[in-house]
Amino acid sequence: MSWMTDRPLNQFALPRGWRGRLAGWVMARTNGTEVAEVLGELGPVRGRAVLEVGFGPGLLSRALTGAGARVTGVDPSGVMLRQARRRAPGARLRLGSAQRTGGADGEFEVVVSMNNLPMWPDLDAALDELHRVVRPGGRLVLAWHGGTEPTRRTLGMLLPAAAAERVLAGLRARFASAELSRTRHCEVFAATR
Ligand SMILES: C[S@@+](CC[C@H](N)C(=O)[O-])C[C@H]1O[C@@H](n2cnc3c(N)ncnc32)[C@H](O)[C@@H]1O
């Protein structure tokens, strides 16, 4: 269950067992374009301490390490941890969640989450935690499917306007600034602490 729905999380939202492995395989083959767009939203990451929340099969973790970032990642799925460690051996990946990252206060210059914001059990607890681990002046970027040209696959997953407003209000209550923008395939909430 999550802050957006009272239905149990499916295999894409919280991958487990062989179905979860299959979901990871599918995500690794379908989310490449979004990874490139999210990376573009982060600006230069070379040498920066970056936390990735909900890394799934590890495509963005791999892209971040390839761009020279010092990557830490947390995800509550053991199945995803194994897939992502294989895909992004240069990243420090561990079990954890948006609401419990295990990071120190102000440890990261950039915190990024791609395609897991609606799965968090408690939005406010997660935003408190992510605000805590972003360094003053650092950035939080939360991306979700959508954008100016959602694909047929993502059309049924768009964030309802009320949910987007709730995220933006939660960010503005905690961060110095926050805005919502769109890439071709993603909704992007970006906040500066
Ligand atoms: C749809 S997948 C997206 C994976 C990857 N970011 C991508 O875009 O390919 C959602 C991921 O969020 C993770 N997840 C579920 N609940 C979470 C939470 N509370 N905090 C962080 N990640 C979570 C799942 O384990 C899964 O790996």
Image (cartoon, grey):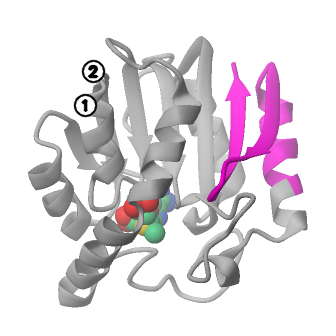
Residue 99 is at least partly visible in this image: no
Image quadrant containing the N terminus = bottom right
How far apart marks 2 and 1 lie (CA) works out to 5 Å
As rendered, which of 39 and 123 lies closer to the eye? 39
Residue at 52% across / 43% down in the picture?
A: 38
User: Residues at badges 2 and 1 in contact (C-beta under 8 Å)?
Assistant: yes
**Residue at label 2?**
68
Mark 1 Cα shell of 10 Å, populated few (<14), some (14-19), many (≥20) = many
Give x and y (percent) for residue 184.
65, 54
Q: Is residue 116 left or right of residue 170?
A: left
User: Assess mark 1: CB under 8 A from ligand 1?
Assistant: no
Q: Give the amino acid type for the residue marked by disc 1 in the picture.
A: Thr
**Residue at label 1?**
65
Residue 13 vs 82, above or below: the answer is below
Residue at 53% across / 22% down in the picture?
A: 43
Q: Is residue 79 left or right of residue 106?
A: left
User: Magenta span has 122?
Assistant: no
Q: Is residue 181 left or right of residue 152?
A: right
Range of magenta residues = 165-193
Residue 79 is at least partly visible in this image: yes
As rendered, which of 68 and 53 lies closer to the eye? 68
